[in-house]
Image (spheres, helix red, strand yellow):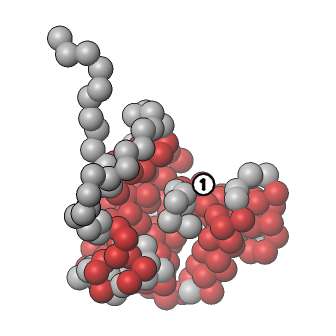
């Protein structure tokens, strides 16, 4: 799954969690309904299914961990979208060892900025900043996990193949966030 962004799967997970909480659907029904209305490739659909099942299966412990990071708030008082994005991020931090914590936090902040309020990004970032310190990923070292070694790119032995993508494309945004590329100007100089 390394070649594609998990953002659409995270959005599908959020939608299913919202349907469960607000629409009172059961987990399998909510994710099936969500996936029926999306065009996710099989690997991303599986990620969304696993995330929904994992979040529901660990909901109590995830909520406890999140509640310990909230200062002056109770988790039930947090907006539905924000709460479910926090649950998704907490699930990734505690139960998805191959996902870097910075990716989890960035994706969570982007989701709440898109689907909630402007202030939600700062709130979610603050809660997850505290949660990551309490998580198994507190001292994240991608080299400790062989699956993640690819993220810490080795120095090339020869000139690398250069792939050109549009600077304002979704792929460029994801690569920029992950720190895996640099923008190079190729137009005429003034």
Residue 7 image position (x, y, % from top left): 54, 56
Residue 107 visible here: yes
Residue 52 visible here: no
Judge by depth and name the residue closer to the eye, 160 or 173.
Answer: 160
Q: Name which residue lies at 37% across and 71% down.
A: 150
Q: Is residue 101 above or below residue 134?
A: above
Residue denoted by label 1: 8
Where residue 41 sits, quadrant-wise, is bottom right
| Residue at the extreme front of the image, as rendered | 158
Q: Is residue 25 left or right of residue 16?
A: right
Q: Is residue 176 left or right of residue 23?
A: left
Where residue 30 sits, quadrant-wise, is bottom right
Judge by depth and name the residue closer to the eye, 157 or 48.
Answer: 157
Q: Name which residue lies at 37% across and 50% down.
A: 161
Residue 157 image position (x, y, % from top left): 24, 63
Residue 186 image position (x, y, % from top left): 29, 26
């Amino acid at each position: 799954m390394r070649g594609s962004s998990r953002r659409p799967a995270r959005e599908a997970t959020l939608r299913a969690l919202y349907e469960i909480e607000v629409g009172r659907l059961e987990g399998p029904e909510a994710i099936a309904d969500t996936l029926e209305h999306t065009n996710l490739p099989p690997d991303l659909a599986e990620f969304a299914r696993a995330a929904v099942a994992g979040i529901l299966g660990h909901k109590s412990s995830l909520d406890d961990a999140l509640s310990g990071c909230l200062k002056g708030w109770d988790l039930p008082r947090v907006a539905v979208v924000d709460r479910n994005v926090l649950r998704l991020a907490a699930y990734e931090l505690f139960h998805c060892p191959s996902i870097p914590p910075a990716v989890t936090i960035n994706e969570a902040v982007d989701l709440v900025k898109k689907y909630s309020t402007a202030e939600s990004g700062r709130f979610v970032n603050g809660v997850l900043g505290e949660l990551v310190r309490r998580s198994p990923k507190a001292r994240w070292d991608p080299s400790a996990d062989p699956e993640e070694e690819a993220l810490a790119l080795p120095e090339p032995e020869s000139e690398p193949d250069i792939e050109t993508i549009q600077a304002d494309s979704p792929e460029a945004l994801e690569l920029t966030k992950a720190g895996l590329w640099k923008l190079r100007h190729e137009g005429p100089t003034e």
